[in-house]
Image (tube, rainbow, N blue to C red):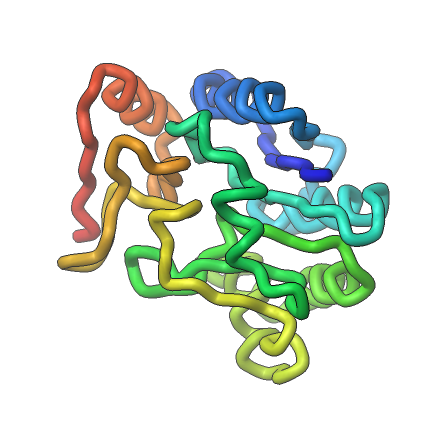
Amino acid sequence: MVKICSLVIGDDYRKSLKKGLESKRLYAEKHGYSYIQGDEKFWDRERPIAWSKIPFLLHILKTSQEGEFIFMSDADVYITNMNLRIEDHIIPLLPLDKDLLLTIDSCGHINDGNILIRNTKWSRDFWKRVYEQTDLIYHIWWENAAVIKLLEENKSDLAMTEITNSCKTFNAYIQGLDGAPLWTPGDFLVHFAGIYDAEKIGEYMNQIDNGLVPRKSMY
């Protein structure tokens, strides 16, 4: 069983990212996955909004079957190849003795914008501890910084985590370091990480639909 989950908060944000959100719904429907879209119910107004995906994720884990796969995908993501199944394309990258699959992105950092989680006791505890890293609430990477901190400080957490350099497989960007692999047609998805103008993201998605390959400078 596979669930695809995304948190999106705000009517304007949902409207601007409608194409991307709809792509996940259609993709899940095609392959028989559940698609769960979180909303303001999970909004922690005491923190920057990006943190709210953690209570959403914890809810999903708590209400899912043991061992179930959760593909957690940020709102700023557009599925661009509907034919690639998660069972064939992503799950084989996660060893049987690990419960979290992350990528090193095209900017050279661990990124939790598109991740695969096996629902286990460790996973539920790990994401609970991510949320407890209150010293990082206002870090520019928000909850992503908390994930990195725990992996750096706890060998037991790192041992349960697979980190792949194959970011194009399920976390492709349109910007990155010189020579880094970027999104091209045929890739599973494009993640518009670091682009905070939702209307601009909508424009990029339209460009892709028109056969273009958008690029953005990191600088």
- In the image, residue 215 sits, relative to residue 28, either above or below, namely below
Residue furthest left in the image: 178
Give coordinates of residue 121: x percent, y percent. Answer: 82, 63
Query: Residue 21 versus residue 189: which sits nearer the camera?
Result: 189
Please give the name of the residue rendered at 66% of the width and 64% of the height, measured from the top-left corner: 96
Let me know if residue 39 appears in the view.
no
Choose top left, top right, bottom left or bottom right for residue 70: top right
Report the side of 218 relative to 110 (left or right): left
Query: Residue 132 versus residue 28: which sits nearer the camera?
Result: 28
Let me know if residue 21 appears in the view.
yes
Give coordinates of residue 106: x percent, y percent. Answer: 29, 56
Report the side of 187 relative to 48 (left or right): left
Query: Residue 166 versus residue 17: which sits nearer the camera?
Result: 166
- In the image, residue 72 sits, relative to residue 41, either above or below, namely below
- In the image, residue 138 sits, relative to residue 197, either above or below, namely below
- Position of the N terminus, as image quadrant, is top right
